[in-house]
Image (tube, rainbow, N blue to C red):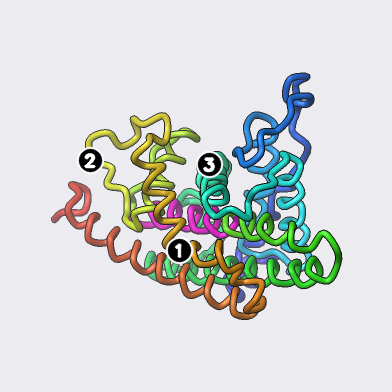
Amino acid sequence: MSERSERADGTDRTPAPEPGPAPTTPDAATAPAEPGRAPSGADGDELGATVAALTADDIAPARRRQLLVRMVGQARARGITDLFKPKAALRWMTDTVAEVAPHVPIRDLATLRRHFPGLDDDALADRLVRNASRATAGVGAAGGGVAAVEWAVTPTLLSAPVLLAAETVAVVAIELKLIGELHEIHRMPLPTGGTARAVALVQSWAGQRGINPMMPGVGVSAVLGTAARRELRDSLLRRFGRNLTTLGPFLTGAAVAGYLNRRATRALGEQLRKDLRHTARGLPHKRG
């Protein structure tokens, strides 16, 4: 597609990464999954690839549903059976977000300029927030569409909590990508390296604040500590907790789920931009 077409509709036409089978070891292939546990090893890589594909700016609705169904299948394959229990669902989502965060593809500023030519920083940030909001709305609509089919057939109720948990992880992953790319636009790139960057992304999402590169410890953390996991869990509970006990999206329909996702992602993007502008003014390269 030409640059003119890309500029006209404002979406990134770079093909979404195609999830492929991850290499397995005899232990990984034969060890039974522990119910309610997050993915690890080959399972985590496979789920991470699916989530990465779901974060692309421009996915056809049918493809998005396909990826979401694949994600549900990957969750089921690990023997997850107790996601009807809100605490178990919340624990699984917290662990899974931490696990897949290193797989979220973050474009650097040069790549963003190439994908969206002719836009200044503010216009580019506007475009990213808009695209992410559309993507999370699309996940909500896709989840509602899958649920409509699932509820019409028999293992029905068992599918709903797994689908809701998968949809939640997909929405958070899209927002993690938005967070990383907004940091790029504001000249405050996150630490390099999958794990360190993932920790910064998750902390930024949980606190809905930018990461200040001048703060001690930024880029040093190699794991998501207990306090950070607790903050992530609490943020997931505030954002999605009602859905865990009411199966809200399945009772309200795809349109409402899509609208709520869009609104929440847009609010997150605007709050983060405000915080990043404030932080950037105090950095040495922004003074004078």
Between residues 75 and 173, which one lies in front from this camera angle?
A: 75
Position of residue 218 relative to residue 250, above or below, is: above
Q: Is the magenta region chiefly helix, strand or loop?
A: helix
Between residues 218 and 12, which one lies in front from this camera angle?
A: 218
- Callout 1, which amino acid? Arg
Q: Residue at x 37, y 48 (%)?
A: 231
Task: Count numbered badges in the picture.
Answer: 3
Q: Residue at x 69, y 53 (%)?
A: 16
The earlier-in-sequence mark between 1 and 2 is 2
The earlier-in-sequence mark between 3 and 1 is 3
Between residues 188 and 43, which one lies in front from this camera angle?
A: 43
Q: Kindly check if marks 2 and 3 are in contact, taking CB atoms under 8 A apart as contact.
A: no
Residue placed farthest to the top in the image?
26
Disc 2: which residue: 215
Element marked by disc 1? helix
Q: Residue at x 34, y 54 (%)?
A: 207
Element marked by disc 2? loop
Disc 3: which residue: 95
Reply yes or no: does residue 40 show up in magenta.
Answer: no
What distance separates the C-alpha of mark 2 from that of mark 3? 26 Å
Q: Is residue 37 left or right of residue 65?
A: left
Residue 7: image location, x then y, percent: 58, 71
> Which of the two marks, 2 or 3, is nearer to us in this view?
3
Neighbourhood count class around disc 1 (C-alpha, 10 Å): few under 14, some 14–19, many 20 upward:
few
Q: Which residues are magenta?
A: 170-186
Q: Residue at x 45, y 71 (%)?
A: 266
Residue 34: image location, x then y, percent: 66, 34
What distance separates the C-alpha of mark 1 from that of mark 2? 27 Å
Disc 1: which residue: 239
